[in-house]
Amino acid sequence: MSKKKNKIYKKKGRIIKDLTKNIFKILNEDTNKQYNYKQIAAKIGIVDTDGKTQILKKLAELTATKKIKEGDRGKYQINKDRKYHVGTLDLTSNGNGYFICDDFEKDIFIPSNNLGKGLQGDTVKAYVYSRRKSSKQEADVVEILDRAKTEFVGVLQLNKNFGFVVPDNNKMYADLFISQNKLNGAEDGDKVLVKMIDWPENSKNPFGKITQILGKPGEHNTEIHSILLEYGLPFEFEKEVEEDAAKLPIEITEKEIAKRRDMRKDLTFTIDPKDAKDFDDALSFTKLENGNYEIGIHIADVSHYLQPKTILDDEAYDRATSVYLVDRVVPMLPEVLSNGVCSLRPHEEKLTFSAVFELNEKAQLVNQWFGRTVTYSDQRFAYEEAQSIIENCTLSDDIKSYTMPLDISIIDKEYEVAPEIVEATLKLDELAKILRKKRMKDGAISFDRVEVKFNLDEDANPVGVFFKQSKDANKLIEEFMLLANRKVAEFIGFSKGKPTNKTFIYRVHDEPNDEKLAALQNIISKFGYKINTESKETTTASLNQLLKDVNGKAESNMVETLAIRTMSKAAYTTQNVGHYGLAFDYYSHFTSPIRRYPDVMTHRLLQHYLDGKDAPKADVYEEKCKHSSKMEELASKAERDSIKYMQVKYMQDHKDEEFEGVISGVTEWGIYVEIKSNKCEGMVRIRDIKDDYYIFDEKQYAVVGQSSNNIIQLGDDVVVKVKHTDLERKHLDFSLISH
């Protein structure tokens, strides 16, 4: 497909995705003017019949909900009589909020006294008006349409005849009143899960009942379970789900093998983290007579075992993802599946779903095949073991076996790696590097972020911090997984030079927001860096250069974090707009069905089309995509909270030490400092800086001393000491020793 054609398809996908906003933007240009669907289509750049049909559908929907009105026949304008709008709430920690609604380009401020008992994430009806002395809009919540959540984690403060639960989440501004008969055996000081059951009109506080006692605040399991429950994530399976999983037939029958491509004799191995228990993927490697290489990306065939409309499938869909906390994994599937029957363990036959590619020496794709297979893994490697082969062996005509050193071996003894596996590892690494180089040349962005990991003792206490970096072995696996994900999406979504419009699950990532890029430029200029945003190509190239330039510098983690925040969020959808960060026009998630439900849906749809069946309706899958994206976000928040919890716990034992840090954020109430040696972040409150009276200067990302004109600025090096640790709120307070 030509680049020009592809840009048109991607632009159309993006416009359709944001159709409501695009229509409102046009109608708001002149609220007295009326437009027909052809004029609207022309203004937003839609020229094909399918796109115009979608505009007509959307106009009918907006008219039915009275968001717009039809004036002359077939002509539309903003419904100016309408003062009420439906949207969601985003609250701040100081008690105010913002109303987020497609009807408006910008979020609308809501002062705390206008929240109308609305809580974080609630869907609400709001009255929007302009303030008297300015044209700035504000909103007033008039009705709660749907609560985002009704269960909260907090600590019970018990009086004689009643109690209050003080929520852990600082965006929950009201404590929950608990009557004597709703305590459920909880005692003063317990950390609990409370369900909101009512919020009477005349009451300042919602009423709740305690549904679960989690334990005492500060206890390890109490805090980890609190993190999961705060985001509505379960930490164990119901008995009936475990029983359903235990009943699954796990024998691989000859009848089942006969339906599949038999690849058990192909050299196959896995490369995973050394502590992994669930092995989603394996690679096979075969040298062909024509000098090319057949590489199989074999993925656990979860959809064979996980049948629709079963208890097990419903549970997997509800969870949508495994959750990776610092000290544990909360799996999407019960252990009998995730670590057992589906896991591609060494020296076991497994049912797999495979993408098989023929590549030449230049890593160019010559041929491809997709389908169900049966495979046998000859070897299991940890990343460190594969890396040892890559670093210590070379491709030659006389490749010998490799002795895996004792200090790297995952079986705690030296062992011999067969010559054919050594050769396969080295050739796969060589091909992966060519694929990666091409991907970067095509405009992919390289976020090789340092990952913070903890050494834990037997009681899950953090006794050390180390940084995990992606090396060649990690990148080898990454490139072949990306290849499979990309080619599966292309196979379904694109044919004969144009999109197929078949319903499919895409993993999309939109282009970065211009305003966020400008804000990033403003910040990084203080460190002497710059980005060129003239075009998509220059933006990508300069972002990559920025990430390369900051690598190893004190400010690297902060700049990388800020750069990531300029990016749109990746999400699941049936509307393909491409993946900006990877520079792919088509991309799906196919390679991790043990831990991601969208991959299960991808497998089912791929087999559906391989069987020659017609496309199912997209609406059902779009809803499932939204749910999966939401659950992924909640899991990500829980994962971040578990890291913060461990960082605070680690710093509790280092209160007497001084640490070098870098200022990673500046606000009106304090400066955030990230410690260089362990990436722990805490706050120095402005009121605790005693050498002067400091005022926040938003433009300089700094606080300025009123007498001395001393500037404490984003990116400055400082020395700090731990002042206070709060495990429950996962918060660190620092004292500033020197600047």
Image (tube, rainbow, N blue to C red):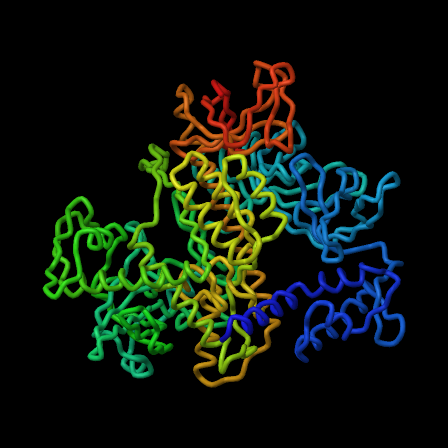
Residue 493's place in the image compared with 666, above or below, is below
Rendering coords of residue 598 (x, y %): 49, 65
Rendering coords of residue 691 (x, y %): 57, 14
Image quarter of residue 30: bottom right
Residue 111's place in the image compared with 36, above or below, is above
Horizontally, residue 20 falls left or right of residue 347, namely right
Which of 214 and 648 lies nearest the eye of the viewer?
Answer: 648
Image quarter of residue 371: bottom left
Residue at the image position 53 percent from the left and 65 percent from the top: 578
Asked if residue 36 can be seen in this view, the reply is: yes
Horizontally, residue 450 falls left or right of residue 613, namely left
Residue at the image position 24 percent from the left and 59 percent from the top: 380
Residue 439's place in the image compared with 542, above or below, is below
Which of 222 and 331 lies nearest the eye of the viewer?
Answer: 331
Asked if residue 222 can be seen in this view, the reply is: no
Rendering coords of residue 132 (x, y %): 88, 41
Which of 596 and 333 lies nearest the eye of the viewer?
Answer: 596
Which of 589 and 551 lies nearest the eye of the viewer?
Answer: 551
Horizontally, residue 327 falls left or right of residue 293, namely right
Rendering coords of residue 577 (x, y %): 56, 66
Going by the picture, which residue comes out furthest to the bottom? 612
**Number of marks in picture:** 0
